Every structure is written in structure tokens, then in C-alpha cells.
Image (cartoon, helix red, strand yellow):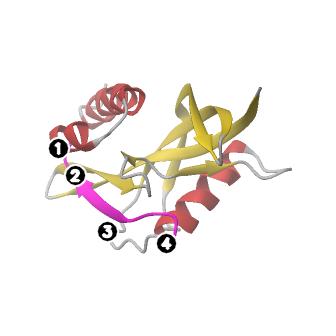
Amino acid sequence: MSLILKTIGAILYRIENNQILYLLLQYPDKAWGFPKGIQDTGETFEQTAKREIWEETGIKKLELDTNHKFEFDYFCFYDGIKHHKFATLFLAKTEDKKVKISHEHLNFEWLNFEDALQKLTYDNNKRILKQAQEIIDKEKLGQ
């Protein structure tokens, strides 16, 4: 039997010197991924995403793009219990580069697309990063 949970977050990026940089967080299991967390009762997806980004990175000032969200599911184990997580990640832009990681993380890095793609641990995160990059590229070109 597995526990079913919703996890919400964002692919957080900023632009520096005309280059797109993505924020990746390192989790205690050494995996690299995006800021996300469990939805609290009564929260909207957007509220959860903003809260989780703030709690995990210290970043409050951001533009959450609710028109672009990415969904996937995955399984993980905590304390010997199997969890089935359904993740929703929004695209989010910030101008802040200062990050204050939470106790839940070991490290963080702002990386360009190629380096972020190499650093991400899981294929589902790599897949949505590619989709996010395509969206940002199209918006930069005004398409």
C-alpha cells in the first residue's frame, strides 16, 4: 500500500547577462531537483508553489506563470513507506539571485540549461526542463 501525496513547486529561473539560469536544489539523498513540497490543506496550487519556493530558497519576489505548468508522478520511500507523489511545477521567473536554502537541502546552484540538464538527477525533471527551455526561448523571441 502506498501513500498518495500532491507536491507543488516551480522551475525557477532568472536572466543574467542575457543568459537563462535555473535554480537547482540538492536534497539529502544527494539528488538535484527543483523547489517543491507538499500542498497544505486549503491551499491553491499557486499558494503552495510560492510558499515552498520561499521556505526552500528564501525567494519571495517572483513571477509565477500559471499558464505553464508541468505534471508528472513518481514513487519514493520514506521510513519504509512507499509514497506515490503527483507533482505539479510551474514556470517562475525571479530577479533575485541570493538564495537561502532551508534545512531540507544540502546545496543550491544557478545553472545554464546545459549544466542544469546534466546536474538534474531524475529523467522526469530533465524532460520538464527541456519543455521549460522551449517555452522561455519562444517568449524571448516574442512568438
Residue at left offset 55%, top offset 46%: 9
Q: Is residue 105 magenta?
A: yes
Q: Residue 58 has which mark?
A: 4
SS class of the residue under badge 1? Answer: helix
Q: Are marks 1 and 2 in contact (CB under 8 Å)?
A: yes
The N terminus lies in quadrant: top right
Q: Give the residue type that dot 4 points to.
A: Gly
Residue 95, quarter of picture? bottom left
Mark-to-mark CA distance, 3 and 4: 10 Å
Q: Residue 115 has which mark?
A: 1
Going from N to C along the chain, the mark reached first, 1 or 3, is: 3
Going from N to C along the chain, the mark reached first, 2 or 3, is: 3
Disc 2 target residue? 111
Q: Give the residue type that dot 1 points to.
A: Asp
Q: Are marks 4 and 2 in contact (CB under 8 Å)?
A: no
Q: Is residue 93 above or below residue 127?
A: below
SS class of the residue under badge 3? Answer: loop
Disc 3 target residue? 97
Q: Position of residue 126 (x, y in %)?
A: 33, 30
Q: Position of residue 117 (x, y in %)?
A: 24, 36
Between 119 and 77, the one nearer to me in the picture:
77
Q: Give the residue type that dot 2 points to.
A: Leu
SS class of the residue under badge 2? Answer: strand
Query: Which one is closest to the eye, mark 1 or mark 4?
Result: 1
Going from N to C along the chain, the mark reached first, 1 or 4, is: 4
Mark-to-mark CA distance, 4 and 2: 18 Å
